[in-house]
Amino acid sequence: MDDISYNLTKHEALTYLENILGIPDPVSFVNKNKVAFLQEMMRQTKLKLPFTNHTFMLTEDILNVYYLQEIKQALFKHEGGNCMALNTFTSAVLQCLGFDTYLIGASIQKWKVPLYNNHTAVITKHLTAPDSLHLVDVGCPIFLPLISLDFDRVSQVYHTRGLQYRLFQVSPGVVQLTRKCEPPKPGLGDGLIYAEDEEFWKVLITYRTSTTRKLAECHYQNDVMKKNPDLAPGVADGFLFIGYPNNLFVNITNNHCLTTTESGHTEATQMENSAHVIDTVLKYFPQYSRNHLEKHAYYSAKKS
């Protein structure tokens, strides 16, 4: 399979970092401290750009030659995107700044059956030492930090927004992201939960870290999900807007809206119809066009 490219210029990459993510003088920042820059880029991406299926839903033909430009335009309008959009574009921006990155496939766990390579993430090489590997994943709803993959069997624990995460190595080149959870109920057992130091960790994502994935493959996977939304319900159909406006966690999935403050206070709202959903999206994410959201609702209704 021939590969494709965003054809991103360094000027575009710097404009994106400065004007969209709000990172001043990124070149000096990178030269001073690459790790700190990458951590800040990831943090600002989560704070500024929603995880959403909006552009995905509005595009009739994922494989058309203009889709990568549609992704770029959406990101330059603060509209975010899905994993393929956010992570592949992040990789392209980092390469413009001299980072050594490659794309990988991953599987998000759903209903105890992982959908193979339904997720895309980024590996950064040689960041802290020759041959070091770090996971960059700004294309999932979790507020993940920069994660070192240079560990034996079990990673350190990462604390983010009141939750705890760690990685387990399944085999060479395969790691699983987990979240700390309650013990499984006696007698039921659950192959998706690790026990470590009398704590329990539920598998969320399986990453294949040693196999490079072409951008064209990510593009094709998006097309498969577009044509077969049942493969990823809630992501390949309906409304999905997840982000952190004003540091408030907001999850709008179809007609449900969940908000959580940093202190953990949660409110849930049930929306009556698509007009109510659109009003709610615009309340928290005013960067979107009402006209485009109405088209999103129309395409969602056609699929159901």
Image: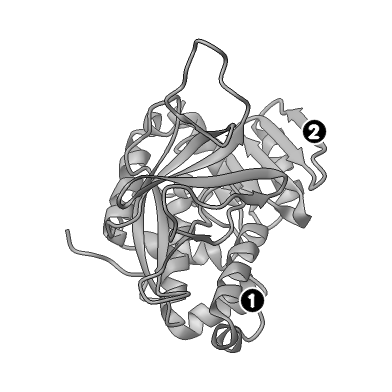
Residue highlighted by disc 2: 267
Which sits earlier in the primary sequence, circle 2 or circle 1?
1
Who's the residue at 46% across and 82% down the image?
97
**Three-letter residue code for mark 1:** Asn
Mark 1: few, some, or many residues within 10 Å (few <14, many ≥20)? few
Closest to the camera, between mark 2 and mark 1, is 2
Extreme residue in the left direction: 1
Who's the residue at 59% across and 75% down the image?
37
**Three-letter residue code for mark 2:** Glu
> In this orientation, does residue 53 appear?
no
Mark 2: few, some, or many residues within 10 Å (few <14, many ≥20)? few
- Disc number for residue 19: 1
Extreme residue in the front direction: 197
> In this orientation, does residue 2 appear?
yes
Who's the residue at 47% across and 47% down the image?
154
Residue 250 placement (x, y as % from top left): 70, 44
Say how the picture is coloured.
one colour
Who's the residue at 27% across and 56% down the image?
211
Depth check, front residue: 53 or 155? 155
**Which quadrant, please, contains the N terminus?**
bottom left
Residue 69 placement (x, y as % from top left): 41, 66
Depth check, front residue: 131 or 118? 131
CA gap between label 2 and label 1 equals 32 Å
